[in-house]
Image: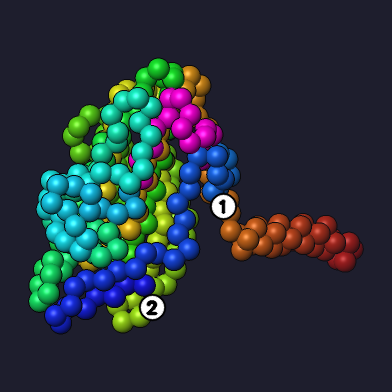
Amino acid sequence: MVSLISSGLWLCQAKLVRAEIYVPDQSVPGVSGDVFGWDQGDVNSSFAFWDSFDDFLGGSAPGFLPAGSSPAANSVFDNGGLPSLLTFESNQSIASSGNAYGGLFGPGDDSTFLTDAFATVRSGTSGGSFTRIVAQFETLGSELDYSSLLLSLTDAPGTIAPSFAIETNRVSLGGTFGGEGVSYLALWDLDSSQAEYRFDFMAQSNNMSLDKVRIDSFTRNTPFITPSAVPEPSSFAMLGLIGTTIVMARRRRRVLPLLGS
């Protein structure tokens, strides 16, 4: 749940319950095909996971996260290279939970800011000429602007949309402020291999609480097969109904001439 109390008390935010962040060697429900295809810590892979955003010079929870800050990841595997980075391009508050929040710097402050950030994904080239990057997010309240999730092959803002994306969980937060807790996964399948990539993301509106971010990458010498979403049970039921209707219509067409003879 999210609790924002501005009358003399500091912002307090609890972690998302029933969170859905997946790691290599796990299957992702609702997805046909492998999202990862490697194990965490494998050669030619990397990952960085932020569970809080207060680990930078002068950072504290609760506190203030100024634009330009790059909080250190809570856990990371860089395969002997540089770790992936997450840099905020907008001012944020840091909630007592460690969440990065687009508003309310302190007691009596009603400032709100749009969460805007980018990640520098450290990858590798020794594994081959094909790279998969998997980015996962958990947000509270306001949601990500999912159209803003764009990759770049340079250090310029991204232009490449994900090869596949899926919402992996959604819960209603309820309470006074409401909103949704959302887990989201996006991946890029690339026929290139280089030391680093960049992807950008931002919130749909002010007051988004960024709960978790995880970035995985893997390089290999064969192309990836991009996964797809498994149709909802209702979709299967509708397909069955359509099929039954078609069969019945065909049967009627066969019977009618006999009835008219």
In the picture shown, does residue 226 fall above or below 97? Answer: above
The residue located at (52%, 34%) in the rendering is 39
* Residue 150: % across, % down: 29, 42
- Name the kind of residue labelled 1 in the image: Pro
Look at the image and tell me in which quarter the C terminus lies.
bottom right
* Residue 31: % across, % down: 55, 48
* Residue 234: % across, % down: 61, 63
Q: Is residue 87 left or right of residue 135?
A: left
Residue 174, which numbered label? 2
Q: Quadrant of residue 115?
A: bottom left
In the picture shown, does residue 229 fall above or below 256? Answer: above
Q: Quadrant of residue 120?
A: top left
The residue located at (44%, 20%) in the rendering is 127
- Name the kind of residue labelled 2 in the image: Gly
Q: How many marks?
A: 2
Q: Are marks 1 and 2 in contact (CB under 8 Å)?
A: no
Q: Residues within 10 Å of mark 1 (few under 14, many from 20)?
A: few
Element marked by disc 2: loop
The residue segment tinted magenta is 35-49
- Is 116 or 4 nearer to us in this picture? 4
Residue of label 1: 29
Query: What is the image's colouring?
Result: rainbow
The residue located at (27%, 59%) in the rendering is 98
